[in-house]
Image (tube, grey):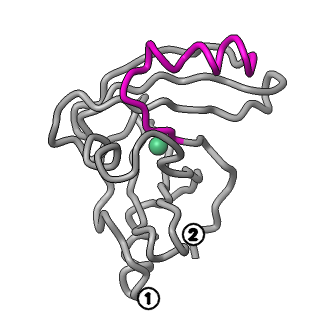
Amino acid sequence: MIEARALDHVGIAVRSIESRRGFYERTLGARFAGIETVPEQKVRVAAFLVGAPGREVRIELLEPTSEDSPVARFLEKRGEGLHHLAFSTDRLSERLEALAAASVPLVDRKARGGAHGTRIAFLHPAASGGVLVELCEPGD
Ligand code: ZN
């Protein structure tokens, strides 16, 4: 079992962060929390926070930085929109081994580097009935 602690963030695939951020900032009233590039996933990630301080939900807009980015392939197939839900957990490597042993469909059998120093891994959408699920473990 994953023992997910919280919904860490919602990932949304966009072709252009600049052309989509207005909705989150001005329409939704989300607070911009920074942009970073995650080379391992070939994306730029813009983070926005919604909700009261200390209880925010993070929304991440994902923009591909190259045509062979997984997010670029997602955009080609499905267009812009909800890409994944991310749940925070601990002992990620151990949990991935247990999930693999239980035949849960995984995209990543090993954790890799995510935004802001986290370690992440994706479960295959077939595991959940169509939603790509990310597990993330805070960095040190
Ligand atoms: Zn994510």
Q: Residue at x 79, y 32 (%)?
A: 55
- Disc 2 marks which residue? 2
- Disc 1 marks which residue? 102
Around disc 1, counting alpha carbons within 10 Å, would you say few (fewer than 14), some (14 to 19), or many (20 or more)? Answer: few
- Highlighted range, magenta: 11-29
The quadrant holding residue 57 is: top right
Front residue of this view, candidates 65 and 93: 65
Vertical arrangement, residue 32 with respect to residue 136, above or below: above
Which corner quadrant holds the N terminus?
bottom right
Q: x and y percent of residue 48 in the render?
A: 60, 22
Residue at the right extreme?
52
| Mark 2 in CB contact with mark 1 (< 8 angstroms) | no
Mark found first going from the N terminus, 2 or 1: 2
Residue 65 lies left or right of residue 95; in this view the side is left
Around disc 2, counting alpha carbons within 10 Å, would you say few (fewer than 14), some (14 to 19), or many (20 or more)? Answer: some
Q: Residue at x 43, y 20 (%)?
A: 17
Task: Give the numbered dot on residue 49.
Answer: none
